[in-house]
Image (spheres, rainbow, N blue to C red):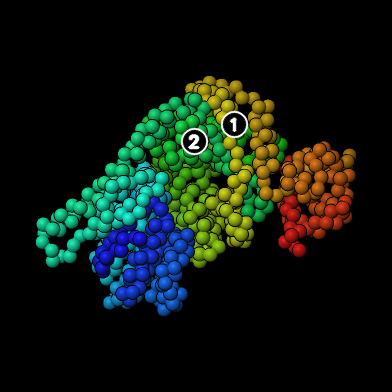
Amino acid sequence: MPTTIQAKPHDHVVQFYQDDTRLTKVVADYFRAGADAGERLVALLTPPHRESLLEQLAADGVDTSSLIAEGQLVILDARAMLDRIMRNGVPVHSLFRQQLLTHIETSPSQPVRAFGELVNLLCDGGNPAAAVQLEAFWHKACERLPLTLLCGYDLYAFHQEGGQQAFAAICSHHSHVLPAEASFPTTDKHRTKGIPPLCQQPDGGQPKTELQAQDKRAQDTCDQILAQLTAPASAERETLYSALEGALSRGEMVLHFRPVVCAQTRQVVGVSVVPHWHSDSFGIMAPNRWMEAARETGQSAAISRWLLAGACRQAMGWYVVPGSGLRMTVPISASDLISTDLIARVDEALAVSGLPGEMLELEVSEDSLTGFPRQTENAVRLLKARGVRLAVAGVASASSILQHFSHYPMDTLRISGTIIDGCLDNRHHQTTIESMIVMAHQLGLSVTADNVSTREQVSYLQELGCDTLQGRLWASMEYCEPKLETAARAASDADLFSGMDSTESPVTNWKEGHDLLSAIMDTTLDGLGVLESIRNEGGTITDFHIRKCNHRMCEIVENSASNLIGKHLLDIHPGTKEEGIFQAYCAVVETGTPLQMETHYLHEGMDLSLRITAVRLGDGVLVTMTDISAFKH
């Protein structure tokens, strides 16, 4: 059984844990004692912990429904509350008091027992500085109010960069330390052995020497946990730094491409690139796990040049495929943005690849715009003069739009994925998203929603007028260069900025673009087809050549690619003329106006309800077809 927390008002307790089940038992025991004492209970929980806590309390005989109905138990969404009190990645004390402490100060004389996950979310999200600042807010609240606070921290989060310093600072803000192994065996994540149980500071009436002894025991507890955290992290860090040396020249850096989808037509309109390290020792790693090491070892500039060159080369591969140009979005860091050679890098990459500047979009984080305004303004001006588009990622509030976008002529606003997560059931998130889209469009900005994971989110964001979408829903469409090709190019990409001519030819670029376009088409969720116009001597469209179709399109029309590609549309599907689909395609080609329609197709042995969208593609159309028969039924 968990150790019972003998806590009283003004106590600030920290529970380090490595297993969610054991954390739930500790919190349930803590709340049950508070309920028995008649205290108000306030919980700031993530949804999984909310459900598990309610189940555990019910199993312990606590009538949570009555407690909630009577207002004795208040459960708040931790992520939503964190969004309300944060601005530009920093907690704001006035918002902390306004949004959060109002739930605690309702009855000043009644003791309140609270549990929160806000600081743990910041630690887990790689923002230790904000975590320490928010912990200080909580500690002052505990001193001022009749509040007992229990905080839960996953030890695994402190293995991240800067985590050990945050751990030490967080320990200093607590009067009680409940280490993860006080009552339970360790898990396999990271073992923390030999940690003593609960260390408490005594009542103020105890002798000073005893106070000092208690303080020392609490500090010793933190020191022992910190030692366990630091040892494996330091060893792994040194190994990672060593393995990263020469990773680029060995061809271990690989370009990963993620589709950007039009919210209205569901068609792929762009691609963003992210460098991944394909390490033999560590596996495939996203940049957040190794970029800091690259900066500290002096490799980040070379990787940045390689990324820009490879992205432009690949984008040109799509651009020369007739009608299939996809804009390429390349992330750059704050140091890249104010670097004296950024413009030279961009000029070189565009010149060598042949890519037009308007097909390139550089993406910076919102934090990148907070320092060095003069250098930033100059870089933005020079990039815009070359036709390069600029996007800002991680925007989480409408106030950020006024702060940054009124100063710099940006093109695209990317809404933070943490806001999109709650867009269906969190009213605060919904209000934020709605205001951001309206304000962005008034300023002439395109809006991209990040981290989209469900079709319901797609429909909601489409209704709000969001322009483009990106996220886990299209994970099957993500694509990376084969590692062998990457290794072969590593040297030539390094030479690209040394004045050497590229050996890539337009034919090679076309082939790569064609292959990647095929990969995207063959993994999309809807049917895709490319139709080329057939015209008579008078220039009138009389039919369409079926030039390309993906696997899903073949499934929908119940035919094979070999029976479709190269054939005439009206020979294969004459019903398209009877239903007016053929004529609608012709209108798209002639006017350039996109088509959206729903139809019931009862021809050639098929009985389908279809949603069809089409956009002009050269002298033809790119068709997206969705089977909505089950929905209509």
Residue where numbered disc 2 is placed: 283
Identity, as a three-letter code, of the amino acid under mark 1: Pro
Q: Is 71 or 466 nearer to us in this picture?
A: 71
Identity, as a three-letter code, of the amino acid under mark 2: Gly
Horizontal side of residue 147 vs 622, given as left or right: left
Q: Is 482 or 183 nearer to us in this picture?
A: 183
- From this viewpoint, which residue is outermost toward the bottom? 70
Mark found first going from the N terminus, 1 or 2:
2
Q: How many marks?
A: 2
**Percent from the top left, x then y, of residue 384?**
52, 41
Q: Residues within 10 Å of mark 1 (few under 14, many from 20)?
A: few
Residue at point 37% right, 63% down? 27
Would you say residue 336 is visible in this rendering?
yes
Any mark on residue 374, and which?
none
Picture layout, residue 481 above or below residue 76:
above
**Percent from the top left, x then y, of residue 133?**
31, 55
Would you say residue 133 is visible in this rendering?
no
Callout 2: SS: strand
The answer to which quarter of the image holds residue 510 is top right
Any mark on residue 482, and which?
1
- The N terminus appears in which quarter of the rendering? bottom left
Residue at point 55% right, 32% down? 310
Picture layout, residue 297 above or below residue 416:
above
The answer to whether marks 1 and 2 mark residues whose Cβ atoms lie closer than 8 Å is no
Q: Residues within 10 Å of mark 2 (few under 14, many from 20)?
A: few
Circle 1 or circle 2, nearest the eye: 2
Q: Is 239 or 422 nearer to us in this picture?
A: 239
Could you give the CA–CA distance between mark 1 and mark 2, rounded to whole angstroms?
15 Å
- The C terminus appears in which quarter of the rendering? bottom right
The answer to which quarter of the image holds residue 200 is bottom left
Horizontal side of residue 415 vs 33, given as left or right: right
